[in-house]
Image (cartoon, grey):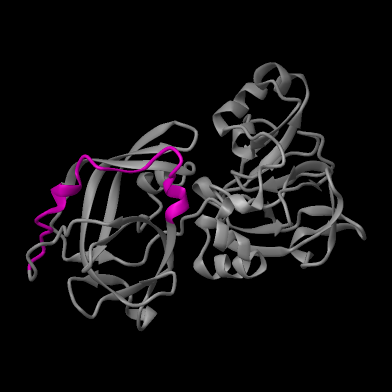
Amino acid sequence: MPTTFNVISIGQLADIDTTEGNNTAENASALVGMTFGGEGDALVNDFVELSPVGDPGSFYNMNNSPNDQFSIDGGPAQTFDATSVYNATITYIDGTTATFTAVVMQDTDGNTYIAPEFSNNADQAALEAGAIRSISFDSLLGNSYTGTTANREEWDFVPCFTAGTEIVTHKGMRKVEDLEPGDLVLTMDHGYQPVRWTGKRTVPARGTMAPIQFEQGAIGNDVPLRVSPQHRMLVTGWRAEVNFGENEVLVPAVGMVNGENVRQIEGGQVTYVHIMFDSHEIVYAAGVPSESFMPGEIGLTAMGQDVREEIFAIFPELEEEGLAAYGTDARPSLKASEGYLLH
């Protein structure tokens, strides 16, 4: 299990552990009834990376001790103070909801974070089911703990190709993991464009991190194609026009699953690869059009700090002016739930 993982920062809040030296967060109920995130302020934009301070090998449990410290996005040491668990409601970007039990961690200064689970359980599945707009704490489930388990599940939502996917370049078909900055890739709207950044990550292919497989010919693809669940494919034709008034739309792959020739495949490990251009582009993978990496609502902010800093070095305007500086999606984008109307 990793000792560096993503959490969602929900701000500097009231101290939930008002009496030190015991195992109870006496003021945990102060957060009940609060909602974090919302329309135009989605929590998916508040991912940060938590990592141990000191020996990672001993970073398994954080107890109420001044020696148990962590850092956020590589910043200064913060001292763990308390944890509580809440019955909570998630609202996803597409408006759907789910209930789960939220693990909340707080440092001695009141900086508060929603943590992933320490196992791949039903609550983790809810956290990974889609990009999160908001989370509401409905009731207090528990506030008496000696600390919290610090080895937790990986947690992100980054759309991307799987290693082995062939992309059309000026030198013919090339595997996406072999592309480097400067390589020219064929785009639908702007001809050959240079790759500005690439990245990759290997994760267990399970739950909502398992790839979506399009069997050969499922969407006109020349060979079987695998992408991450949130990776968006270009869909054209009368169904898009009739249902959404657009001739071309981008649809998350998970919204195209039909249980036949488009399925989610679990098992083993999967390497996801990102390619980024000067703007959001439609590229050709396995002979069909789909998107490049878009540092938007479910992209850049769900990545680790080291990756964000790397991209900010290439695109400083994103750090200075915000993600809107990158521009808009190459095509209108549908919610995963809307994609089912195109079957």
Residue 329 percent location from the top left of the image: 67, 42
Numbered label tally: 0
Q: Is 183 placed left or right of 249 in the picture?
A: right
Question: Magenta span has 36?
Answer: yes
Task: Specify whether residue 343 is in view.
Answer: no
Residue 147 percent location from the top left of the image: 21, 66
Looking at this view, name the residue that lies furthest to the top.
242
The structure residue drawn at horizontal position 67% and vertical position 59%, both measured from the top left corner, is 273
Q: Is 282 placed left or right of 313 in the picture?
A: right
- Quadrant assignment, res 38: top left
Chain part drawn in magenta: 22-46
Looking at this view, name the residue that lies furthest to the right.
171
Quarter containing the N terminus: bottom left
- Up-down relation of residue 46 to residue 76 (above or below): above
Q: Is 174 placed left or right of 53 in the picture?
A: right
Task: Specify whether residue 302 is in view.
Answer: yes
- Up-down relation of residue 24 to residue 242 (above or below): below
- Quadrant assignment, res 289: top right
Residue 86 percent location from the top left of the image: 23, 46
The structure residue drawn at horizontal position 11% and vertical position 54%, both measured from the top left corner, is 27
The structure residue drawn at horizontal position 46% and vertical position 41%, both measured from the top left corner, is 40
Residue 260 percent location from the top left of the image: 67, 30
Q: Is 198 placed left or right of 141 in the picture?
A: right
Quarter containing the C terminus: top right
Q: Nearer the viewer, residue 323 or 98?
A: 323
Q: Nearer the viewer, residue 333 or 229?
A: 333
The structure residue drawn at horizontal position 35% and vertical position 59%, both measured from the top left corner, is 118
